[in-house]
Image: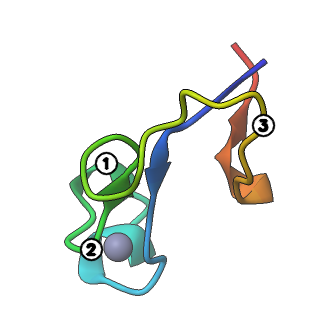
Amino acid sequence: MTIDLNIYCYKCYYCLKDQKNMCENKEPFGITKNGIFSEYVAVLVFSFMNC
Ligand SMILES: [Zn+2]
């Protein structure tokens, strides 16, 4: 299991079309948000993905 390091808005055109990778308001950890070089990090439950 891993997490998607992007936080999506779930409101824009692309999110509503289930194309979240194109989200207009995406906030990736380490780019627009602080990185995650920490022992613990809080993420949305939607971020978990099975590989
Ligand atoms: Zn969006």
Asked where in the image residue 17 lies, by quadrant, the reply is bottom left
- Per the image, the residue denoted by label 3 is 40
Q: CA distance from mark 3 to mark 1?
A: 25 Å
Hey, what amino acid is under mark 3? Tyr
Q: Observer-nearest residue: 28 or 38?
A: 38
Q: State left or right for residue 44 relative to residue 27.
A: right
Hey, what amino acid is under mark 1? Asn
Tag 3: Cα neighbours inside 10 Å, few (<14), some, or many (≥20)?
A: few
Q: Residue 49 bears which disc, if any?
A: none
Q: Residue at x 27, y 64 (%)?
A: 23
Q: Earlier in the sequence, mark 2 or mark 3?
A: 2
Q: Earlier in the sequence, mark 3 or mark 1?
A: 1
Rendered view: 6 above or below 5 = below
- Split into quadrants, the picture shows ligand 1 in the one at bottom left
- Per the image, the residue denoted by label 1 is 21
- Per the image, the residue denoted by label 2 is 25
Q: Residue at x 49, y 39 (%)?
A: 5
Q: Residue at x 43, y 77 (%)?
A: 9
Residue 43 coordinates in the image, percent (x, y): 70, 53
Q: Nearer the viewer, mark 2 or mark 1?
A: 2
Residue 18 coordinates in the image, percent (x, y): 44, 61
Tag 1: Cα neighbours inside 10 Å, few (<14), some, or many (≥20)?
A: few
Q: Observer-nearest residue: 42 or 38?
A: 38
**Which quadrant of the rendered structure holds the N terminus?**
top right
Element at badge 3?
loop
Element at badge 1?
helix
Element at badge 2?
loop
